[in-house]
Amino acid sequence: MTEEVINKLPDIFKARIGTLKKASYDNENHVYMSESQMKVILFDKIPKSYAKNTNCPNVPASNDALYMSKDDDWYFIEFKNGSVDKADLYRKIYDSLIILLELGLMPDYSCIRGTVNYILVYNSEKYGKIQASKARDMNFDYIMRLSDQEEQLFGVEKFEGYLFKTTHTYTKRLFEKNFVIPMEACETSGDLRK
Amino acid sequence: MRLKIENFAQIRYADVIMDGITVIAGENNTGKSTVGKILFSLFNATSDIENKIISQRTAEIRNMCRRYLRNGIVYESGEEKRVWNASPFSTATAIARQVDNVLKNENAEMDKVREGVHAVLKKAYGKDQRNPLVQEIENEIMGQIEKIINLPEYAIITELISRYFGSMFRSQINSLIMPELKAKLTLYIKRSKNILLFEGNICADYSSEIDLVNQAIYIDNPFVIDKLSDDYGLDMAETYLVRLLTRRPDQDPMDGIISSVLAKEKLSEVYAAVRSVIPGNIVEGQNDKYFLEQENYKQPVSVGSLSTGMKSFLILKMLIERGQIKEKDVLILDEPEIHLHPQWQVVYAELVVLLQKYFHLSVIVTTHSPYFMDAINVFSVKHGIDQGVHYYLSSVEDGWAAMEDVTDHIDSIYKKMASSIQVLDSLRYELNNQ
């Protein structure tokens, strides 16, 4: 996020700015899923402050990061380096949106649908029980390309147009290609224009 | 050409354009094959309808004559004795042929029928021609023939249509959800139309502004190749196909050499595509058995022993080489990719595109394969026929099937096909991370 965007943020967010790399840290395996130095809101730190402020006995779940582009497109980013529990994933989505509403950062769901996007970044390089096959991936990619749609896993696409403007599930490589590089370029070009 | 379908079987409404190749995709049990079955029944029941009516009448006359002539036995001095020399079968056939000749003539008159029938019977009676019983039989036969000839055409046509559709749809033509609704089919060719109405699973009305002249060929199951010498147990479409595959060319082998050379030049691309999968010639052996002669084999291979994929190609090869596909015919292919590896799906698709191009066919093809569909798309552009290719997506809502024209956004077909990839990849991820 550019300084300009950060400056406009409410204090609760300003206090939680960090790099995308930091947001992508996997505590269990001690690895980062992104090396990007782009600034994001470390959103998983927000629920604690939120619970404290609202006297809520339980801390809500939340996505890992929130990124706001210069064009005022918001992106929730969730990093998953291991198993994906759909119930857990969905709860993080719901709780994160409730926090946005409760804090008054979004007036209603209609505004959320028009502004907020969702990206799940997962690790596709792990192979356990199922044999890896590059050729199978090629076949599947070919069909996905024909259908002119992005592959989305874990049923995340159900939220597109309902709670989010767009939803995506990216491998680390696709996340770099489809999100990090374009956003970094956008931030830099903006600086140059200034 | 356009086919509008209303309340027919599972289909609530469909309006399908057939200008070249019409691709119908969609999940199972969404009415995809219904369109092809309708076209098969509609074309084959009503094309060349006048001759069909005559054939129906003469077939009935032949059966009736057989019955009468078989019973035509005179008792003389307590001994059973036939009063004529000829057999009831050949006499009945000769009578039917006489009637057929007269009816096919533009000035068909009852007197001419009488003369013809009398001449046949006279020849058959021999010395017994004055026997009163023989006279009586002749009178009865003549009365029956007159009745059959005077049967209104319309009644025969609707019966013919009912039989065709009844056989293809196992007598379930009207909707099972709302059986009281009339099923309606409208076939538009240029500015004219033919309409068929069905009530209680039979044809209730038929009106035609167009005389259909082309046939429809329905190819579904490559195993018909195993039934070329014995078509027992086949359905109507399969029987029709087997007859085409085994029909010998009627012309003198020296006839039409010029047109054959022209066709070969025109069809060189088609032959090349077929040869890439099946090099070699089909030869007929004893007992109506068919064999494939190939260079590497010392003996020809029985077509029944070929792989199922090859049988799919063999059907097209035989139809083309035997001249059974005619200009502007309707070719219906029901999931042709089923037994084919993606490589051959691509070859088959190009063959279909080329056949459409050179024979100006109306091809209706249903598919579940992204490879096959993509190949139809790509080759139709390569061979310059893409303007005539239309895509439909079938789906079911509240038990009714509908066809959406998705020619401008074919990715919606691929989306359906790709949905299973997301399910599998999600599951793979979960299993790998357990």
Image: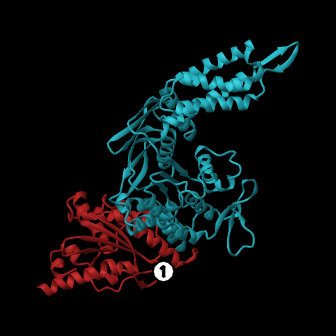
| Amino acid type, residue under disc 1 in the picture | Glu
Residue at x 29% of width, y 61% of height = A98
Residue B5, percent from left and from top: 41, 41
Name, please, the residue furthest toward the right.
B78
| Chain A, hue in figure | red
Chain letter of disc 1 in the image:
A
- Image position of A150 (left or right of B432): left
Q: Secondary structure at mark 1?
A: loop
Residue A129, percent from left and from top: 58, 74
Q: Is residue A58 visible?
A: yes
Q: Quadrant of the C terminus of chain B?
A: bottom right
Residue corresponding to mark 1: A125
Q: Where B18 falls versus A25 (above or below)?
A: above
Residue B192, percent from left and from top: 34, 40
- Image position of A90 (left or right of B281): left
Q: Where A129 falls versus B30 (above or below)?
A: below
Tag 1: Cα neighbours inside 10 Å, few (<14), some, or many (≥20)? Answer: few
- Image position of B158 (left or right of B17): right
Q: Nearer the viewer, residue B108 or A44?
A: B108
Residue at x 73% of width, y 23% of height = B69
Q: Is residue B426 visible?
A: no
Q: Nearer the viewer, residue B16 or B252?
A: B252
Name, please, the residue furthest toward the left.
A194
| Chain B, hue in figure | cyan
